[in-house]
Image (spheres, grey):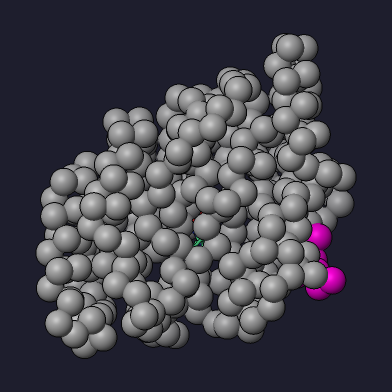
Amino acid sequence: MKTLAKINVPHPFPYQGSKRGIAKYILPYFPSDVRCLIEPFCGAGAVSIAAAAHGLAKQFTLNDLNKPLMELWSEILERPSVLCDEYERQWLEQQPDRKAYFFKVRNEFNKTHSAYQLLYLLARIVKGSVRYSSDGQFNQSADNRRSGMKPNTMRQNIFGVSALLSKKTTITAVDFRQAVKKAKENDLIYMDPPYQGTSFTRDHRYFNGLSYEEFAEALSHMNELNLSYIISYDGITGEKSHGKLLPDNLHLKHLHIHAGRSSQATLLGNNHETIESLYLSPSLVRRLESDKPSIRQHRALKQQKLAFA
Ligand SMILES: C[S@@+](CC[C@H](N)C(=O)[O-])C[C@H]1O[C@@H](n2cnc3c(N)ncnc32)[C@H](O)[C@@H]1O
């Protein structure tokens, strides 16, 4: 575990549910010897980006079931310059009538699934909240009070993310179970699946639903393989707890972290503070305990400062 120095961590695009704000609470639970960090529900990949910025893994695997999103990730890592030029072109072109331009791009995206158009849509949609209709059409509206991230800021962010992750990252767009198939004992898997407690209030915010039972079954299999994983799973907003706890028979270490006022809560129209659940797998806990005493001591200090319970 390295010192978490204050580093300005770039982010590639706004994404509802992004762990950008709380990545710093999750990194202290990384063991010191992570070969590959695998993020099977990556979205905007906030934890991988933060881990790369702090040098906490040698390689990365980013995966999300949303194929156009992962094509966008490929562009970010392999062709950042073309991507930023295209973003700038669209951003400037939209100015005479941003509202009409957004609908034009959205209609085209639903035919082409182009990564360039997706970046523009992500920059313009309300609270970065991706939504698809039941027949798979991107149907979120634009926030017409804003133009979307300025091209120069976008360029800085995209190049920043690209510098951190290109040449050491594998990108896939498959179900999370498939994405963890190649995981080894010296890897670390960070999972941030769709929220169970709130998905019924606003359908289709994420690309796919995921049942509690299916998720628990996959975790049980991962335990049999001695895999190290961290899960962000639901949380408490105000007095309301979202969803069930993960089952006891998985023997996970359950922690709570204060996540501040959540965008989730804002989406649902309240201002409560969110407490996020973090679960650590039994193999990860053993691995953390077997780190050198100096590393453990340093980590304990970090955890004390950042977490409770
Ligand atoms: C809560 S978001 C992850 C946000 C991410 N941690 C970040 O920092 O931006 C959950 C993601 O899981 C993806 N997803 C949903 N079902 C999936 C599945 N079965 N396999 C892989 N990804 C899935 C969604 O497309 C969505 O991007």
Determine the image quadrant of residue 162.
top left
Q: Residue 207 location, x and y as percent?
A: 46, 70
Query: Taking 26 as reference, is 149 left or right?
Result: left
Magenta stretch encompasses residue 243: yes
Query: Taking 296 as reference, is 158 left or right?
Result: left
Query: Taking 31 as reference, is 37 left or right?
Result: left
Tell me the residue at 34%/82% (across/down): 144
Q: Residue 104 location, x and y as percent?
A: 19, 83
> Which quarter of the image is occupied by the N terminus?
top right
Tell me the residue at 41%/49% (across/down): 11
Q: Residue 166 location, x and y as percent?
A: 30, 35
**How many numbered marks have been drawn onto this rendered protein structure?**
0
Q: Which residues are magenta?
A: 239-245
Q: Residue 136 location, x and y as percent?
A: 38, 79
Tell me the residue at 19%/72% (across/down): 112
Residue 29's place in the image compared with 141, above or below, is above
Tell me the residue at 77%/26% (across/down): 301
- Is residue 118 visible to us here? no
Determine the image quadrant of residue 77.
top left
Residue 32's place in the image compared with 72, above or below, is above
Q: Residue furthest bottom?
A: 100
Q: Main secondary structure of the magenta part?
A: loop
Magenta stretch encompasses residue 193: no
- Is residue 278 visible to us here? yes
> Which quarter of the image is occupied by the C terminus?
top right
Residue 32's place in the image compared with 145, above or below, is above
